[in-house]
Amino acid sequence: MRDSLPYVLVLYYSRHGATRSMAEQLAAGVESCAGIEARLRTVPPVSPTCEAVDPEIPAEGAIYAELDDLRHCAGLALGSPTRFGNMAAPLKHFIDSTSALWLNGTLVDKPASAFTSTSSLHGGQETTLISMLLPLLHHGMVYAGLPYSEIELMTTTAGGTPYGASHLAGQRSDQPLADAERRLVRAQGKRLARLALALAPLREAAS
Ligand SMILES: Cc1cc2nc3c(=O)[nH]c(=O)nc-3n(C[C@H](O)[C@H](O)[C@H](O)COP(=O)(O)O)c2cc1C
């Protein structure tokens, strides 16, 4: 018998806090759904010259993810700042350590989604979200974007895309989430939680 609730892993990298604030809102969306919880985890920065050895516990924010957090999740939300239209290297570095899970098909049929923050409105939100979708598909995950039944997708003047939630953080990465951005990222968390609960019995039946 399971002694703890299933969880959606909210795995993000954030240097200046914008992606982190999205992660926290997405987690709140997950936890608005009964019977499932959110697990917030981050990844350490990487050094350009050699592998940096960071303290095991980061100074602030979520603790660092371990492969077991991913192995046992019921769903995954992946968050990254946009970096040159792509996900940030620290998150990619962590994803590149997941081949054992890929070999065993551990993540097959689990739902996943992505979210991102940029400094400029047309600075590559969609391309970053798609860059994050690629490894998720290789893992056999079921990608969940944001449906247009979330009406703010049509009206937002900041972030929010059908590929996943996004945030326009401004040049200093200091703009708070706009109301529409917050509602959309929460809706994404709630949807992911519902899908995680719905897909779990299918996976169990197939195993
Ligand atoms: C190396 C680097 C590349 C970046 N590339 C882009 C970009 O392509 N488009 C954009 O709009 N912002 C870009 N930014 C800005 C960040 O995406 C933006 O500040 C983001 O909100 C930071 O998120 P964080 O507060 O979670 O760290 C870049 C920042 C850095 C450091």
Image: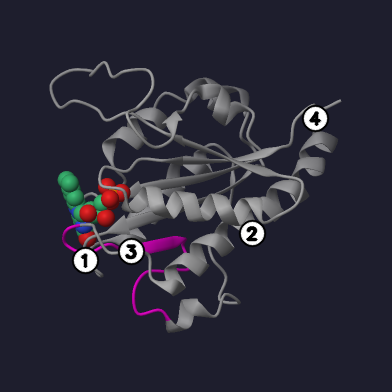
**Residue 37 seen in render:** yes
> Is 167 a magenta residue?
yes
Identify the residue under disc 3: 176
- Residue 101, by quadrant, is top right
**Circles 2 and 4 in contact, beta carbons < 8 Å:** no
**Residue 85 seen in render:** no
**Front label number (2 vs 4):** 2
Mark 3 Cβ and ligand 1 under 8 Å apart:
no
Q: Taking 73 as reference, is 104 above or below it?
A: above
Instruction: Give neighbour class at mark 3: few <14, some 14-19, many 20+ (Cα, 10 Å).
Output: some
Position of residue 31 in the picture relative to residue 84 (left or right) = right
> Is 183 a magenta residue?
no
| Circle nearer the N terminus (2, 3) | 3
Residue farthest toward the bottom in the current orientation of the protein: 155
Q: Taking 158 as reference, is 6 above or below it?
A: above
Mark 1 Cβ and ligand 1 under 8 Å apart:
yes
Residue farthest toward the front in the current orientation of the protein: 59
**Front label number (2 vs 3):** 3
Q: Estimate the spatial distance between the alpha carbons at disc 3 and disc 4, rounded to whole Å.
A: 44 Å
What is the x, y in percent for residue 58? 35, 27
Identify the residue under disc 4: 207
Q: Estimate the spatial distance between the alpha carbons at disc 1 and disc 2, rounded to whole Å.
A: 27 Å
Identify the residue under disc 2: 191
Q: Amino acid at mark 1?
A: Ser
Under circle 3, the secondary element is: loop
Q: Estimate the spatial distance between the alpha carbons at disc 2 and disc 3, rounded to whole Å.
A: 23 Å
Q: Taking 143 as reference, is 158 above or below it?
A: below
Under circle 2, the secondary element is: helix
Q: In the rendered structure, which segment of residues is drawn in magenta?
A: 156-172
